[in-house]
Each structure stands twice: as structure tokens, then as C-alpha cells.
């Protein structure tokens, strides 16, 4: 990552790649596929930081409850607050928003 907090550019071109997500109580990480990384809203900070959102798709089980999880995919290793959106064809959808 290029800054202390992730920015959209950190995820540019990573759609279709899998992230290992460590979850408490699970012996192995859950693999979530990044399906979308896009700008969201307008820059609001004095530095012009662009809010963005990430969408992930994972397996139908286990479903990760809303919470903070460590996402790993070199060169990225970051804790992200993740919200489950619901089932999708063959899997489960999640969203992460950075404002």
C-alpha cells in the first residue's frame, strides 16, 4: 500500500483476484474474490482523498458476520470493516467502504 490508509489505487486492476481473509474461530482463511473496486462519492478531505468501495464474493459457507477482518493478498495486508450484503449465485457478497 502507498499510504497509512488504503486508497483506491491500491486495488486498481485487482478485480478477479482472491484475498485470504482471517476470521476468528476458523482454522483456515476464507477466500474472497474482489469483484469491484470503484470511486464512491466526491473527495471530501483537504487532501482530496477519494472515498471508494470494494465488493467481494465468497463461498456460501461460512458467512462472515459484519466485522473487521484482515485481508491479505501481496502486497496488501490490511484490516477492513466488512459488511455482508447477501447471497449471490453460488456464493455470498460483501462490501467494504472507505470514506
Image (tube, grey):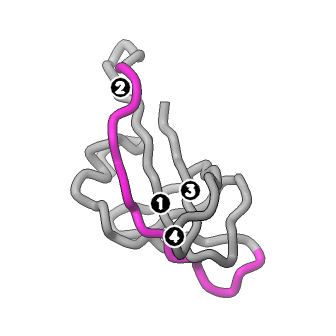
Mark toward the start of the polypeptide (3 vs 2): 2
Residue at the image point whose x is 63% and y is 57% from the top: 86
Magenta includes 35? Answer: yes
Mark toward the start of the polypeptide (1 vs 3): 1
Say which quarter of the image contains residue 15. Answer: bottom left
User: What residue range appears in magenta?
Assistant: 25-42
* CB-based contact (under 8 Å), mark 3 and mark 4: no
* CB-based contact (under 8 Å), mark 1 and mark 2: no
Q: Which mark is residue 94?
A: 3
Q: Secondary structure at mark 4?
A: loop
Mark toward the start of the polypeptide (4 vs 2): 2
Measuring from the top left, give residue 33's x and y in whole percent: 42, 68
Measuring from the top left, give residue 61's x and y in whole percent: 67, 78
Crowdedness near tag 4: few (<14), some (14–19) or many (≥20) residues, C-alpha within 10 Å = few
From mark 1 to mark 3, how far is it between C-alphas?
Answer: 5 Å
Mark toward the start of the polypeptide (3 vs 4): 4
Mark toward the start of the polypeptide (1 vs 2): 2
Q: Which residue is mark 1?
A: 56
Q: Which residue is mark 2?
A: 49
User: Of all residues shown, which one is farthest toward the bottom?
Assistant: 27
The image shows residue 56, relative to residue 27, as above or below, that is: above
From mark 1 to mark 2, how far is it between C-alphas?
Answer: 22 Å
Amino acid at each position: 500500500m502507498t499510504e497509512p490508509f488504503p486508497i483506491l489505487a491500491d486495488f486498481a486492476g485487482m478485480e478477479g483476484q482472491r484475498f485470504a481473509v482471517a476470521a476468528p474461530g476458523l482454522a483456515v482463511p476464507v477466500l474472497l474474490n474482489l469483484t469491484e473496486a470503484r470511486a464512491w462519492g466526491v473527495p471530501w478531505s483537504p487532501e482530496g482523498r477519494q472515498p471508494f468501495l470494494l465488493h467481494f464474493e465468497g463461498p456460501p459457507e461460512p458467512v462472515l458476520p459484519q466485522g473487521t477482518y484482515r485481508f491479505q493478498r501481496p502486497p496488501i495486508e490490511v484490516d477492513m470493516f466488512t459488511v455482508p450484503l447477501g447471497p449471490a449465485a453460488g456464493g455470498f457478497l460483501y462490501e467494504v467502504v472507505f470514506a
